[in-house]
């Protein structure tokens, strides 16, 4: 018969062993790869939106999910290496908002990829169709470059006398730069406006391009959608203020930082949707069964304080249509 002391000793050992066994049986959380052409400093609010989307499907980083972040900081050429690194780490899903989607697609045909692109993903070769993506990719088409004509029209409404507009594009981002010019050039002709294109693909070239366009004396500046420009929005807005040059941008982040006006898709909502699709795939959905979502939320944002500094009187009709007016 087991003695009382031996029984207590055995029971105590079991009490220590049970938590160890339980911990050993806990499943390893899935790992998501997050590939961005932006920088962490410029993307905190977008990352928060991505996390909200994950949360809607029950995933919380640090609890039941791990995330490997890869940031290109505006250097598009680095995306291929960053995508390849995520593939080597065998992540469960790659979330690739922006131009990183193309690098992710080139890096793997097996790991699910959730993209967010401003152009037609079918034309980009990311999916076979919007309704039936096939392959290992799906995501969000959030229309930025395609809104160039609308943005130019709003600029004409804000400044009816503006006849000459400088357009700033990043030649390293070939797809977006080309799509922007395809939209803006015919729209400018229809509006009776002249455009002159300036290029910048790094911080130094932004200063150089701005010096060149200021010498030309345009009435306004049209900044193309681009990760480099978003990362350097404080630099761009500072240059615009220094030279008293009205400028229009693709996303609200510029206007929140002091830019004059923006019109485009709610990029924050796009990141949230990417988070939702990432979570659904982690739960077992196949990318090929998830149709590409198309953005439905567009926003016009005007900084009235900046307009006053530029001595621009914003038409009441334009103010009435604005989704947000920053005083």
Image: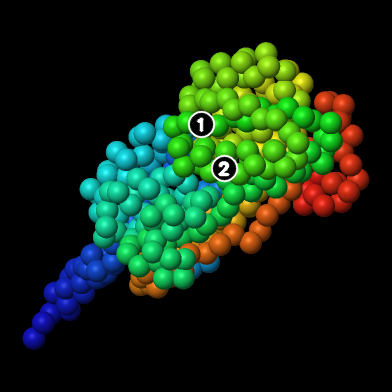
User: Horizontal placement of 267 versus 164: left or right?
Assistant: left
Q: What is the residue that sits farthest to the left in this orientation?
A: 1
Judge whether residue 85 can be spotted in this image: yes
Which residue: 75% across, 40% down? 191
Q: Is residue 222 above or below residue 13?
A: above
Q: Closest to the observer: 215 or 40?
A: 215
The quadrant of the picture occupied by the C terminus is: top right
Residue 45: x percent and y percent? 58, 46
Which residue is at 46% across, 36% downward? 173
Instruction: State the separation of the CA atoms marked 1 and 2.
Output: 14 Å
| Residue 258 can be seen, yes or no | no
- Residue 257 on image: x %, y %: 69, 34
> How many dots with numbers?
2
The percent coordinates of residue 202 (x first, y second) are 48, 24
| Residue at x 68% of width, y 54% of height | 298
The residue that disc 2 covers is 182
Which callout, 1 or 2, points to the residue nearer the camera? Answer: 2
SS category of the residue bearing label 1? loop
Q: Is residue 152 above or below residue 24?
A: above
* Residue located 32% across and 40% down the image: 80
Mark 2: give few (<14), some (14-19) or many (20+) Cα within 10 Å.
some
Report the front residue among 183 and 41. 183
Looking at the image, which is closer to me, 10 or 142?
142
Mark 1 — residue?
170
């Amino acid at each position: 018969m087991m003695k009382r002391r031996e029984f207590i000793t055995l029971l105590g050992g079991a009490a220590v062993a049970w938590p160890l066994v339980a911990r050993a049986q806990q499943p390893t959380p899935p790992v998501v790869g997050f590939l961005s052409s932006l920088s962490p400093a410029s993307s905190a609010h977008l990352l928060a939106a991505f996390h909200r989307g994950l949360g809607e499907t029950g995933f919380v980083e640090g609890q039941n999910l791990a995330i490997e972040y890869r940031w290109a900081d505006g250097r598009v050429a680095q995306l291929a290496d960053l995508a390849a690194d995520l593939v080597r780490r065998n992540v469960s899903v790659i979330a690739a908002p922006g131009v990183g989607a193309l690098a992710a697609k080139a890096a793997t045909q097996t790991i699910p990829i959730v993209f967010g692109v401003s152009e037609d993903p079918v034309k980009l070769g990311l999916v076979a169709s919007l309704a039936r993506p096939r392959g290992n990719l799906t995501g969000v088409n959030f229309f930025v470059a395609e809104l160039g004509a609308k943005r130019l029209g709003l600029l004409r409404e804000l400044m009816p006398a503006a006849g000459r507009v400088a357009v700033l594009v990043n030649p390293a981002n070939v797809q977006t730069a080309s799509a922007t010019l395809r939209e803006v050039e015919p729209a400018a002709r229809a509006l009776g406006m002249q455009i002159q294109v300036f290029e910048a693909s790094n911080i130094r070239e932004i200063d150089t391009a701005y010096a060149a366009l200021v010498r030309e004396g345009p009435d306004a500046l049209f900044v193309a959608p681009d990760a480099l420009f978003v990362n350097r929005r404080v630099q761009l807005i500072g240059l615009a203020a220094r030279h008293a040059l009205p400028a229009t941008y693709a996303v609200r982040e510029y206007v929140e930082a002091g830019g004059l006006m923006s019109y485009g898709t709610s990029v924050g909502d796009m990141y949230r949707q990417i988070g939702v699709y990432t979570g659904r795939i982690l739960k077992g959905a196949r990318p090929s069964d998830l149709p590409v979502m198309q953005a439905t939320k567009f926003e016009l944002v005007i900084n009235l304080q900046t307009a006053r500094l530029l001595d621009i009187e914003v038409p009441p009709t334009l103010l009435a249509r604005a989704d947000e007016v920053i005083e």
